[in-house]
Image: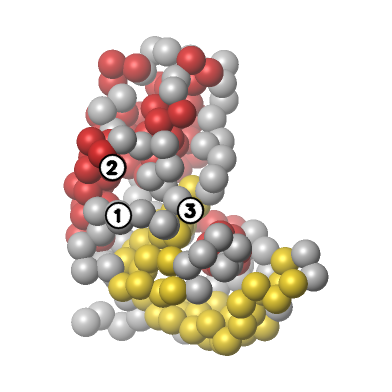
Amino acid sequence: MEASLLQAQDLACWRAERLVFAGLSFTLAPGEALLLTGANGAGKSSLLRLLAGLVPAAEGRLLWEGEDALADRPAHARRLRYLGHQDALKPGLTARENLRFFARLWGGAAEEALAALDLLPLADLPARVLSSGQKRRLALARLALAPAALWLLDEPTVGLDAASVERLRPLLAAHRGRGGMVVAATHLPLPLDDARELRL
């Protein structure tokens, strides 16, 4: 097994004057996937936001290759993709235009990303007319743009039918095959072979 790239050491998080979790430690090596499970309110989303650098840790350290991961926040932002509960789409832009916007930021080809989630037939429709499942697929298609080492996914399959969930399998497998890592919060099975589980 390769050496760990991401290390969480004794992390603690407070939200709304409540201790959500404490003493949380784990490591992640290239190609690995970690599933965050647990009841609603257990801290899965908070942990993902902490890993993304969006909320501070109350205690503990987050390391990348043994160094403080958040010492250079722009560099940390470049090495990850974060997909939260909101799809972050511009409703007046078409599916293609939404992906081209992110392709200009990150690189990659919008057409290939659309194809990866079977969205080419919907490419010229404004995002506002898409169903909730189609919007989620469009948000997920951003992952198929230029590679990033770490994918942080918060309930990525919400609103997806079984066929759409299965479309994620090759996308996730290709990412991990390139040495990419996945941390995903979920209540439902995900197409992530050999993923470890961290129950909060």
Q: CA distance from mark 2 to mark 1?
A: 7 Å
Horizontal side of residue 137 vs 67, given as left or right: left
Residue under the point 57% across and 25% down: 90
Residue 196 visible in the current orientation: yes
Q: Which residue is mark 1?
A: 190
Q: Secondary structure at mark 1?
A: loop
- Where is residue 177? Give x, y as percent: 20, 60
Q: Are marks 2 and 1 in contact (CB under 8 Å)?
A: yes
Going by the numbered disc 1, the residue's amino acid type is Leu
Horizontal side of residue 159 vs 33, given as left or right: right
Q: Residues within 10 Å of mark 1 (few under 14, many from 20)?
A: some
Q: CA distance from mark 1 to mark 3?
A: 12 Å
Number of numbered markers: 3
- Where is residue 186? Give x, y as percent: 42, 57
Q: Which residue is mark 3?
A: 154
- Residue lying at the far front of the rendered structure: 39
Going by the numbered disc 2, the residue's amino acid type is Val
